[in-house]
Image: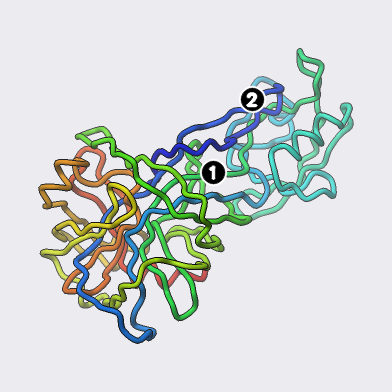
Amino acid sequence: MLTIIVATEKESDKLHVAKTKRIVAVTLILLFFIGITSVNAENNNNQVILGGTPFGLKIFTNGVLVIEVDENNSPAKNAGIKVNDIITKADNTVITSNEQLKSIIENSFGKKINLTVLRDSTESIKTIVPQKNSNNNYVIGMWIRDSTAGIGTVTYFDPNNSTFGALGHGICDKDTNMLMPLRNGEITSATISNCTKGTDGVIGGLNGYFNPDKIGDITANNGYGIYGKYQYTDCTRYVEIAKDEEIKTGKASILSTIEGTTPKEFSVEIIRINLNENNGQNMIIKVTDDELIDKTGGIVQGMSGSPILQNGKLIGAVTHVFINSPQKGYGISISNMLKYSSL
């Protein structure tokens, strides 16, 4: 879950009108961190540098994602294009942006175009014939998206290979809920300016802004988080990685930044564990910290990726909030997160 940020990002282009939509809000990600007791130590494969810090992310898709199709006898509809299709080529031209595909369609003068479409990992060719709209522009009648942005929380930095892991869940398109196909992306440091408090039935969120300094590149976006190479980090606290069998119900803590740039530890309780779940729902956590409940209502958007610690070890990361009970949410185990860090 991502939250709102003040960066303006071009969200989509409607190809059957000369119009560009823009968004001022983006998504943050969820949650908290567990009690840190580790100290600077010699790097080894069983330790990572603890996160808990907010970051800004920008990702660009591999091709463009179809988020809406005009069902009223449009060229896109007639060609069999559907929501969640990924358009990777127009004739022999590789598509990398909304503007590029829009320009190809506008300059087609009504001649047919062969679009290479990726659907459920299967590639096919859809032949489309652009039509003129009321403004005398050639269009095909669909909306597309080539990028997204937001603020989230870093879970860990691995000094052994200069990689990072964050969020504990993938970045999905906000309209279609499809995992965004990653072409490239980057993370910057971020500052949290304020928080919208969550209540029963209403998800709260951390609000903030990107800082100009780039701290890493995103190389993977999958169902277990975002991963990549970091260039530098101000974090210096090492923490040991817990094994699955060390995770127990009971007291724990999360590390999350709800103001500024400095993480703070908050108490939680692990009330259920299911390590057999092959997703970001390996544990249910309940916020017990009075300060966090008073300021945020519990778990809010933007806290995704917040490290969860127990007995001084990193056991996982916050991933989701319960909509009707914001003091509760899901967490992913750190072993699950690390297992899929190279996918």
Please say if 32 is above or below 161: above
Q: Residue at x 21, y 38 (%)?
A: 324
Using residue 52 as the reference point, say whether residue 188 is left or right of it.
right
- SS class, disc 1: strand
Image coordinates for residue 158, horizontal then vertical, percent: 42, 74
Give residue 237's quadrant in the image.
Answer: bottom left
Give residue 156's quadrant in the image.
Answer: bottom left
- The residue under label 2 is which amino acid type? Asp
Please say if 39 is above or below 100: below
Rate crowding at label 1 as few (under 14), some (14 to 19) or many (20 or more) other CA atoms within 10 Å: many
Judge by depth and name the residue closer to the eye, 273 or 21: 21
Judge by depth and name the residue closer to the eye, 231 or 113: 231
Using residue 148 as the reference point, say whether residue 260 is left or right of it.
left
Distance Cα–Cα, label 2 vs label 1: 22 Å
Using residue 134 as the reference point, say whether residue 293 is left or right of it.
left
Give residue 279's quadrant in the image.
Answer: bottom left
Which residue lies under the disc numbered 2?
70
Verify CB contact (< 8 Å) between mark 2 and mark 1: no
Judge by depth and name the residue closer to the eye, 81 or 139: 139
* Number of the front mark, 2 or 1: 1
Which residue lies under the disc numbered 1?
148
Q: Residue at x 16, y 61 (%)?
A: 270
Report the number of discs: 2
- The residue under label 1 is which amino acid type? Thr
Image coordinates for residue 121, horizontal then vertical, percent: 62, 55
Mark 2 or 1, nearer chain start: 2
Rate crowding at label 2 as few (under 14), some (14 to 19) or many (20 or more) other CA atoms within 10 Å: some
- SS class, disc 2: loop
Q: Residue at x 76, y 26 (%)?
A: 139
